[in-house]
Image (cartoon, rainbow, N blue to C red):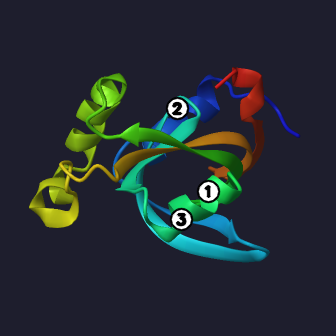
Amino acid sequence: MGNGLNAKTRAILTERFGRDTLLALATLDGDRPAVRTVDSYYLNGSFYTVTSALSGKMQQIAANPAVAVCGEWFTAHGVGQNLGHVRDEKNAPLMATLREAFAAWYGNGHVDESDPHTCLLRIRLQDGVLMAHGERFALDFTAEGT
């Protein structure tokens, strides 16, 4: 695998992805890979995305939660998880952060929180490769217990 995260790699990940970030998300549609760009936010070993439970990506994750992500000199494998409706009380603290991070587009018709299918997707990272300042970091997120 790789090394667990340290203060340096945590800081790089937070600096790059602890804001509204475009991220390539790959899923499996049966035996065919499918990839799309999603708005995401990184926090403590996971990326978070607001989407529809009826979307192709969520249907694919329901059938096979193995995913991969790529963006800004970072690639990783992870597990996709539907955390439920964005207005679910258990999601309130995280959604407050995401609404602020996604403020540039969130409230202008892109998201309908009253739709019961609007959900919070968590991509719990497992392992990845981060490139920064001429260094390559092989990361094992499972050591973090995320």
Which structural element holds mark 2?
A: helix
26 in relation to 134, above or below: below
Reading the chain from its start, which is encountered first: label 2 or label 1? 2
Circle on res. 57 = 3
Residue in the picture at 11% in, 62% down: 108
In the rendered structure, are the residues bearing label 2 and label 3 in contact, judged by CB atoms less than 8 Å apart?
A: no
Is disc 3 surrounded by few (<14), some (14 to 19) or many (20+) residues within 10 Å?
A: many
> Which residue is farthest front?
116
| CA distance separating discs 2 and 3 | 29 Å
Front residue (pair 131, 77): 77
Residue 44: image location, x then y, percent = 53, 29
Circle on res. 61 = 1
Q: Quadrant of the C terminus?
A: top right
In the rendered structure, are the residues bearing label 3 and label 1 in contact, judged by CB atoms less than 8 Å apart?
A: yes
Reading the chain from its start, which is encountered first: label 2 or label 3? 2
Residue 62: image location, x then y, percent = 61, 54
Is disc 1 surrounded by few (<14), some (14 to 19) or many (20+) residues within 10 Å?
A: many
Three-letter code, disc 1: Ile
Circle on res. 11 = 2
Q: Quadrant of the N terminus?
A: top right
Residue 137: image location, x then y, percent = 75, 43
Specify whether residue 35 is in view. yes
Query: Is residue 60 found left or right of 1 in the rendered image?
Result: left
Query: Is residue 41 found left or right of 11 in the rendered image?
Result: left
